[in-house]
Amino acid sequence: MNSFKSKEIWISGFALFSLFFGAGNLILPTSLGLKAGFNWWIVLLGFALTAVFIPILSIFAHAKLQGTLFDFGKKVSPVFSTIFCLLTYTIAIAIPGPRTAAVTHEMAIQPFFDVSPLLTSSIYFGLVFVFVINRSKIIDVIGKFLTPIIVIILLIIIVLAIISSPENNLLPTIKSPFVDGILEGYQTFDAIAGVVVGAVMIVSLNLGNLHTFDEKKNVISKSGLIAGFGLLLIYGGLIFSGFLFSATFPENATRIDILTSLSLQTLGDFGRIFLSVLVALACFTTAVGVVTGTADYIKGICKNSQKAFVITTGICAIIGILVGSFQVDFIIILAVPALMFLYPITIVLIVLNVLPNKYGSKLVFRAVVFTTFLFSIPDFLGFIIDEKYLVTIKNIIPLANNNLGWVLPSLLVFVVVNFWGNNKIDLTEI
């Protein structure tokens, strides 16, 4: 591998890590470690499944497809894929994007300045707008400069937490650590982020010096591995740190309170300053990725119109300003029904697109996606209506009481349709 390609891979890998690592990635792991107690490693396994493994699979899928988000669902049907794209981008700019501004205000601005969250989100998304308009430099700037700062601060906090932890730890307070880890991984939005920022990476590489399909596939795949290793390392360190310091956190502390307390205990008086810089950078890079991905998509369906790109970026910034002025906990609660609806479909589309084509015929895509949608309805409704109306059906569906009722039916349909298609009749052209 020549030095240029090696440099391109590392810069892209760092940029991917930073585009993934945003608000939820910061505030969720430490609180999970607190609740998990001695089961922190089990929680990590579940969390890593939905917050590392699946998102990095989405990058591998992008390396294979090298198209847009539309390509992820086109085997189901063009209409379905269009609706899926619009829903994904709408949710991305309405929840995880604005949430980065809310976290930045509560953790990086509010402790030092008595300003309104609306002012913070206005300045924040004004800067996002400027960055996105200069999208050709995004991967380079984030990968070279912003990510190293983020990683260094995080590693300092984790190392100091491990070597200076108190002797007392709280007992676990969650009954199903693996499942809780999986569902909390949903809240990172990283599977959705993967399909969004992966598309950003494709466009960025197309604007650069890599021209062949294989060159881009190599850079994207290896960059995904670098980002995945970084995410796993940081998540593991933060979850473990949450466990080590579990007895020191205030009672009924919020997710933000827990992370703030950890930084103050490990970094002392400078903890709040370091954490503020970390939060601002981590959140900002993710917001840039989300808005860029959305603007790229709209630009593509508007015949490569730069005007459409700028207008979309402006609309995303306005939405970010408005929603980002709410409290973080409110935005997290708002996100749950949307996640329960879209996340399972996103996961199966990622997995099906990574698999060899012989296991992913149009019939397989249609059958598995429909099954996933059907069996995730009780999970979605469970956060909208009273659970008592769903008890009967949830008791029938395996894992439904853990909000994972779609998993086994989708896997069964995948196996059956593939066996039927391969052994009875060729249905790949249906």
Image (cartoon, grey):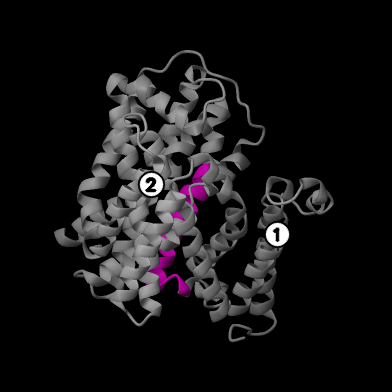
Residue at left 43%, top 30%? Answer: 259
The region drawn magenta spans 47-70
* Secondary structure mostly taken by the magenta-highlighted segment of the chain: helix
Residue 155 in view of the camera: no
Left or right of 50, for residue 7: left
Label 2 SS: loop
Residue 68 occupies which quadrant of the picture?
bottom left
- Residue 248: give x, y in percent of width and height: 48, 17
Residue at left 44%, top 58%? Answer: 93
Give the number of the disc on residue 21: 2
Q: Earlier in the sequence, mark 2 or mark 1?
A: 2
Does residue 68 show up magenta in the picture?
A: yes
Q: Residues within 10 Å of mark 2 (few under 14, many from 20)?
A: many
Does residue 201 show up magenta in the picture?
A: no
The vertical placement of 416 against 280, above or below, is below
**Badge 1 amino acid:** Ile
- Is label 2 in contact with label 1 (beta carbons under 8 Å)? no
Q: Residues within 10 Å of mark 1 (few under 14, many from 20)?
A: some
The vertical placement of 259 against 167, above or below, is below
Quarter that holds the N terminus? bottom left
Q: Nearer the viewer, residue 123 or 400?
A: 123
- Residue 252: give x, y in percent of width and height: 57, 25
Quarter that holds the C terminus? bottom right
Residue 63 occupies which quadrant of the picture?
bottom left
